[in-house]
């Protein structure tokens, strides 16, 4: 061992010559290609392998340090990690951009093209998955010894294309060209049991006899933070069969059924979010959740026990964060491992479990809080159902003693009312020592709504930790023009300590600086203009306002409200083309869940309206509408720096936090938004005069939900709204199928659950204020600079410090220490 570590292996990059040598070496000896005949994919693979080598020493040193200093470890369990591409950010974090660029130029390759040929790892769906990815970056930046644990989906979220205006879905095959970042760990394998029955021995011990056992195999991706000093691990699990082929069957000629067990096992890590409207789909989803949670807990217990012998000290050295309810089964699984494998009593196991786990809630929508039927749950995880019943009994006893007036049915984990099922939100809440919402408003609403009773039982358990985004990816790397300007003006402390960006605020009053800030925005817009032209063939002007709504397609996010405003504006321009219109390009991007018909119909509406507006010669540059297909991290990185206006218009009370809102404000876009999620805190920080707030508050919405809301009366009372809905409903935008959008208009007329009609008038008013504001270039730029300057608090580094202090009990270095460097 010592002899081996004493050998010096030099793969360190000091200059472009080193990069060239390493790339050629990788190309030949790892990729196996002759540099003369290598294609872009090969260069990309070679570069990734060369850069990955740079991480390895720091990675091993980070691990050694954690063991030597016996540091507390943080484990972040998440069904999604929306990491996107890693190459550019890793190069920048390591400070290697200049030598790599130079080397590639000398080798005759195009740096930007090679970066673009890395597949975008779409192992997530939206904000929740991107949050997990930003948190990995921040935990590495802050030097917290941490692992991300998730699933290595063979096919991540589907790839979206638009055919005749409709969304089409294709499998995302990001692994086809190989994931060059990862290290397969064939020796790290765990058994994952399913089904069967629990038998109680004469001594009263419960023994689980599973019907089947599959394997979880580990794949590790190193994650470097800013300056690359500390490197953490993203460990993703792939499903493998215990036995690849059933040889007896195979030899009998039953080739397909000989592979059946293998196919079943591999299905577990095949795709993200299988359609779970069928029983089979629900079964697979529950298996996926248990699969990665169990593998992760077995792995972290093994790591803990390799350097500790007292299992009862687990909470001192391990903190486990559950990202939403998907890994909530961890409560029962950790208990099972502690009791069945490590011989603890139920009481002790429960105490340790609770001290170790904490849970982040991401939604208050009842339909999104997971719940499994007892039938399904008992058939897949019979031992866990017993454990959960035990927890529930303890919990009810505490509840009954503490609050005589409480309706116990409402706080039970196992729901016995007509719905019957295991409430995973309740399980996660009861089994955790801290439960956090993702913005101040969201944490308040948790206490007032779905977790009201549980909050009254455990009053200090809920807290708010407002989300954040990593400034490395979401400004420094994706927006070079602005990043360069900031570094030249205020230095580069903000990259490792985003609150230092406040120093640019005084420059909002400096006309020369405003000119340069505008020039950076213009450069980003020109780049997006070219992309829009090449991807969807629409010509737009970089002088128009770029009005951006990019996020999952969902009725609560109200892309519908936005496109209805576009229709109203379209008619207004047609009526009076000569008036002084503020030119706009409305840019949409987002995927709809495959089974979500209404969201898919809204995509079609956007594209049908776009077709009419973009081809109308009367309109010209005054209004253009663009739907950019396949929204993902890489498209976000190109759209966000070019945005002037950020649409954050969810129904108040429904967006838990949002992080797109933070990225856009940071990149110098003004927000038009409701007082929802983190918009409330963004408003507080940028100042009410530097944001465009409109519409119902969460309280207004809650009151309407009680008193009733009459959308018919609102539609009848608003001529513009009526005209817009009549046009959409009667086929003005779909003459080939006039009834196409009837369902949308009916929904708004009779059951406007998301209050689109209620906010329509206020939204239009605010949009006209935005138009006027945009025309005053100097004042608009001044306000956008103040947005950039004042949103430093929304850094993922700040969020992680909050988790470390309030939830994990882990020390973090000060911002000064981060910037001064050192190991
Ligand atoms: C930031 C981000 C999101 C979250 O956007 P919201 O507007 O907060 O919903 C979703 N998808 C991608 C690719 C992102 O980068």
Image: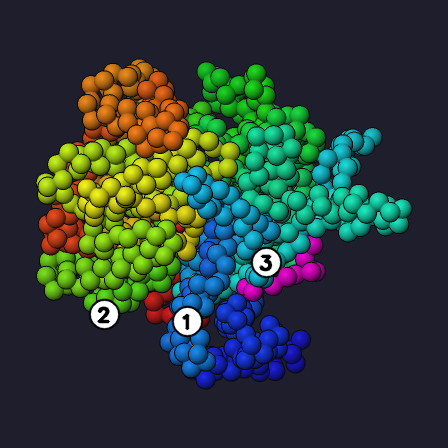
Q: Residue at x 20, y 19 (%)?
A: 717
| Residue placed most toward the observer, 586 or 394 | 586
Which of pointers 2 and 3 indicates the residue nearer the eye? 3
Q: Main secondary structure of the magenta part?
A: strand
| Element under disc 3 | loop
Earlier-in-chain disc, 2 versus 3: 3
Res 311 seen here: no
> On residue 176, which mark appears?
3
Q: Residues within 10 Å of mark 1 (few under 14, many from 20)?
A: some
Disc 2 residue lies near ligand 1 with CB under 8 A: no
Q: Is residue 533 left or right of residue 151?
A: left
Res 36 seen here: yes
Which residue does the numbered mark 1 point to in the structure image?
Answer: 111
Q: Is residue 689 left or right of residue 653?
A: left
Which residue does the numbered mark 2 point to in the structure image?
Answer: 488
| Residue placed most toward the observer, 304 or 446 | 446
Q: Residue at x 36, y 57 (%)?
A: 534
Q: Residue 71 appears at what percent x and percent y?
A: 52, 59
Q: Which residues are magenta?
A: 180-189
Q: Residue 350 appears at what percent x and percent y?
A: 60, 37
| Element under disc 1 | helix
Seen from this angle, which residue lies furthest bottom?
A: 17
**Gap in Å between the C-alphas at discs 3 and 1?**
22 Å
Q: Residue 128 appears at what percent x and percent y?
A: 45, 44
For residue 200, above or below residue 524: above
Earlier-in-chain disc, 1 versus 2: 1
**Mark 3–mark 1 contact, CB under 8 Å?**
no
Earlier-in-chain disc, 3 versus 1: 1
């Amino acid at each position: 061992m010592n002899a081996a570590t004493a050998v010096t292996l030099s793969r360190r990059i000091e200059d472009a010559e080193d990069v060239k040598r390493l790339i050629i070496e990788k190309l030949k000896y790892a990729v196996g290609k002759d540099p003369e005949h290598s294609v872009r994919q090969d260069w990309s693979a070679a570069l990734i392998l060369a850069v990955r080598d740079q991480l390895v020493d720091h990675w091993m040193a980070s691990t050694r340090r954690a063991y030597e200093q016996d540091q507390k470890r943080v484990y972040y369990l998440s069904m999604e990690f929306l990491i996107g591409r890693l190459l550019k950010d890793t190069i920048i974090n390591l400070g290697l951009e200049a030598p790599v660029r130079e080397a590639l130029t000398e080798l005759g390759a195009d740096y930007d093209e090679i970066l673009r040929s890395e597949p975008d790892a779409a192992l997530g769906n939206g904000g929740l998955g991107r949050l997990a990815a930003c948190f990995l970056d921040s935990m590495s930046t802050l030097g917290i010894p941490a692992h991300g644990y998730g699933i290595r989906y063979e096919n991540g979220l589907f790839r979206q294309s638009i055919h005749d205006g409709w969304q089409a879905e294709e499998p995302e095959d990001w692994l086809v060209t190989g994931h060059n970042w990862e290290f397969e760990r064939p020796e790290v394998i765990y058994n994952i049991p399913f089904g069967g029955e629990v038998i109680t021995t004469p001594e009263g011990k419960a023994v689980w006899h599973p019907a089947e056992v599959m394997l979880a195999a580990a794949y590790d991706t190193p994650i470097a933070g800013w300056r690359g000093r500390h490197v953490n691990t993203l460990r993703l699990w792939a499903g493998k069969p215990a036995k690849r082929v059933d040889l007896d069957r195979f030899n009998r000629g039953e080739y397909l059924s000989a592979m059946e067990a293998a196919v079943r096992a591999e299905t577990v890590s095949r795709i993200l979010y299988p359609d779970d409207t069928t029983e089979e789909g629900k079964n697979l989803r529950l298996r996926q959740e248990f699969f990665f949670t169990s593998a992760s807990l077995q792995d972290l217990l093994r790591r803990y026990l390799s350097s500790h012998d007292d299992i009862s000290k687990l909470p001192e050295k391990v903190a486990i964060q559950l990202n939403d309810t998907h890994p909530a089964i961890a409560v029962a699984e950790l208990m099972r491992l502690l009791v069945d494998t490590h011989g603890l009593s139920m009481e002790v196991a429960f105490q340790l479990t609770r001290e170790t786990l904490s849970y982040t809630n991401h939604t208050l929508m009842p339909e999104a809080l997971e719940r499994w039927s007892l039938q399904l749950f008992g058939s897949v995880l019979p031992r866990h159902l017993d454990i959960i019943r035990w927890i529930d009994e303890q919990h009810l006893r505490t509840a009954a003693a503490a609050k005589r007036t409480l309706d116990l049915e409402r706080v039970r984990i196992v729901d016995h009312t007509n719905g019957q099922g295991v409430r995973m939100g309740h399980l996660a809440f009861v089994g955790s020592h801290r439960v956090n919402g993702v913005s101040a408003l969201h944490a308040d609403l948790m206490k007032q709504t779905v977790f009201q009773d549980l909050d009254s039982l455990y009053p200090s358990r809920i807290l708010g930790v407002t989300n954040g985004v990593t400034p490395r990816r979401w400004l420094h790397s994706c927006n070079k023009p602005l990043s360069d300007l900031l570094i030249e003006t205020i230095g580069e402390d903000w990259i490792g300590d985003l609150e230092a960006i406040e120093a640019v605020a005084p420059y909002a009053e400096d006309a020369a600086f405003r000119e340069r800030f505008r020039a950076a925005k213009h450069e980003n817009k020109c780049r997006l203009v070219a992309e829009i032209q090449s991807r969807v063939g629409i010509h737009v002007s970089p002088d128009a306002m770029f009005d951006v709504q990019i996020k999952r397609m969902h009725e609560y996010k109200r892309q519908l409200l936005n496109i209805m405003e576009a229709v109203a504006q379209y008619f207004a321009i047609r009526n009076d083309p000569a008036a002084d219109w503020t030119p706009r390009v409305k840019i949409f991007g987002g995927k709809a869940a495959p089974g979500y018909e209404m969201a898919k119909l809204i995509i079609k509406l956007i594209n049908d309206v776009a077709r009419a507006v973009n081809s109308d010669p009367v309109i010209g540059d005054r209004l253009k509408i663009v739907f950019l297909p396949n929204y993902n991290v890489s498209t976000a990185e190109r759209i966000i720096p070019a945005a002037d206006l950020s649409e954050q218009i969810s129904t108040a009370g429904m967006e838990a936090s949002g992080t797109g809102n933070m990225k856009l404000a940071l990149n110098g876009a003004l927000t038009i938004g409701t007082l929802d999620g983190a918009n409330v805190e963004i408003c507080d920080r940028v100042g009410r005069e530097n944001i465009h707030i409109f519409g119902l508050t969460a309280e207004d919405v809650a009151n309407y939900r009680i008193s009733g809301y009459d959308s018919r009366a609102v539609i009848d009372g608003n001529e513009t709204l009526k005209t817009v809905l009549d046009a959409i409903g009667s086929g003005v935008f779909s003459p080939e199928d006039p009834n196409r959008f009837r369902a949308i208009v009916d929904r708004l007329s009779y059951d406007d659950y998301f209050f689109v009609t209620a906010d329509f008038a206020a939204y239009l008013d605010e949009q006209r204020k935005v138009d006027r504001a945009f025309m005053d270039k100097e004042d608009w730029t001044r306000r956008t600079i103040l947005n950039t300057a004042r949103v430093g608090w929304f850094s993922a580094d700040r969020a992680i410090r909050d988790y470390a202090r309030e939830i994990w009990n882990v020390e973090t270095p000060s911002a000064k220490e981060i910037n001064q460097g050192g190991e």
